[in-house]
């Protein structure tokens, strides 16, 4: 008798011999078990192709640390154009990856963190309303005052965490002057002032907030928590401070910092305040003065 021809052994992904069964037959059987539908390998191939070509579901909301969900903006004018994106109202020059969010009027009073609401991040400084595109902001009456908020804005979750940490550390209220700014709004504002636009403004990326400088504890906490990164700007004309969550470290506004741009001038913090922050960074405990 001649030698029997030995068929090559086939192994599936689970290490089992397939022998007479083909791989597609085995997968078809598994598919039948899952779906309850019978069919040959050809039908299985069609089913498998459908499963493999299914488009992943698009993310439609952004969830913040406290559980708040905000919708991602949709619409022809709310997505970047393929050509000349820098001409888009909401162009992001920093490529932050933060999507443009749709802020409904009812969203404004929702808590985005323990001490802050969505309105704080969408707030428009009233004197800058002239630069905001018509129809893209909410007008809200608050007592005898009228306030304005963006209908579409970016909000970086890292900024939310940073600002909340500063507020909790300082232990005093923080009054927001301005939050998000659109790219072309920012350009219109600087053009009107005959100044060179801050094209890389972190407000445009939803990574910055401006506050009233109401208490030196706020700046002291920021200097401590942002000792390694983030941007701090001091504006004496407005008596305001700017905080942003950039990953690099930057300090600005000429004449308001020491020569190393490390510590604010005395008009912002006393020498004793600066030393207190330095000691805290160094891990030194300050002795309380006996009364």
Image (cartoon, rainbow, N blue to C red):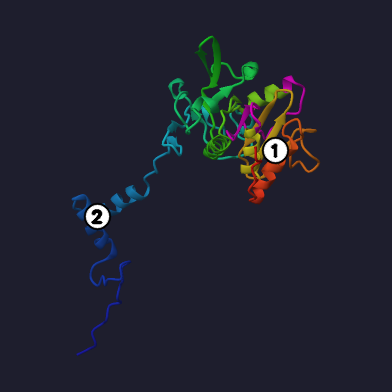
**Magenta-colored span:** 191-216
Kindly indicate the quadrant of the structure image that contains residue 111.
top left
Residue 6 visible to an observer of this rendering = yes
Q: Residues within 10 Å of mark 1 (few under 14, many from 20)?
A: some
- Helix, strand or loop status at disc 2: helix
Image quadrant holding the C terminus, namely top right
Check residue 31 in the rendering and tell me which mark sits there, or answer none.
2
Check residue 100 in the rendering and tell me which mark sits there, or answer none.
none
Of residues 9 and 172, the one nearer the viewer is 172
| Distance from Cα at disc 2 to Cα at disc 1 | 69 Å
Check residue 273 in the rendering and tell me which mark sits there, or answer none.
1
x 72%, y 24%: residue? 190
Kindly indicate the quadrant of the structure image that contains residue 288.
top right
Kindly indicate the quadrant of the structure image that contains residue 104.
top left
- Helix, strand or loop status at disc 1: helix
- Overall secondary structure of the magenta section: loop
Q: x%, y% of residue 158? A: 54, 40
Image quadrant holding the N terminus, namely bottom left
**Does 12 sit above or below residue 197?**
below
């Amino acid at each position: 008798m001649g030698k029997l021809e030995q068929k090559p052994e086939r192994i599936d992904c689970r290490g089992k011999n397939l022998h007479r069964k083909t791989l597609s037959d085995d997968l078809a059987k598994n598919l039948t078990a899952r779906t309850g539908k019978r069919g040959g390998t050809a039908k299985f191939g069609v089913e498998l192709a459908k499963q493999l070509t299914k488009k992943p579901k698009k993310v439609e909301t952004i969830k913040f640390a406290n559980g708040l969900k905000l919708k991602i903006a949709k619409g022809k004018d709310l997505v970047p154009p393929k050509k000349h994106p820098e001409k888009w109202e909401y162009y992001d020059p920093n490529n932050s990856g933060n999507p443009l969010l749709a802020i409904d009027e009812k969203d404004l009073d929702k808590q985005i963190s323990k001490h802050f609401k969505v309105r704080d991040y969408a707030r428009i400084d009233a004197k800058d309303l002239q630069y905001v595109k018509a129809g893209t902001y909410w007008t809200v009456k608050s007592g005898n005052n009228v306030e304005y908020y963006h209908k579409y804005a970016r909000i970086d979750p890292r900024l939310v965490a940073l600002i909340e940490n500063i507020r909790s550390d300082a232990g005093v209220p923080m009054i927001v002057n301005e939050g998000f700014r659109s790219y072309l709004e920012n350009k219109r504002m600087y053009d009107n002032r005959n100044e060179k636009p801050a094209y890389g403004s972190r407000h445009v990326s939803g990574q910055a907030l401006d506050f009233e400088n109401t208490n030196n504890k706020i700046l002291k906490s920021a200097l401590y928590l942002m000792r390694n990164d983030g941007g701090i700007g001091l504006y004496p004309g407005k008596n305001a401070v700017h905080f942003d969550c950039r990953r690099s470290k930057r300090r600005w506004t000429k004449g308001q910092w020491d020569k190393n741009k490390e510590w604010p001038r005395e008009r912002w913090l006393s020498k004793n305040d600066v030393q207190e922050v330095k000691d805290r960074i160094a891990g030194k405990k300050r002795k309380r003065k006996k009364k």
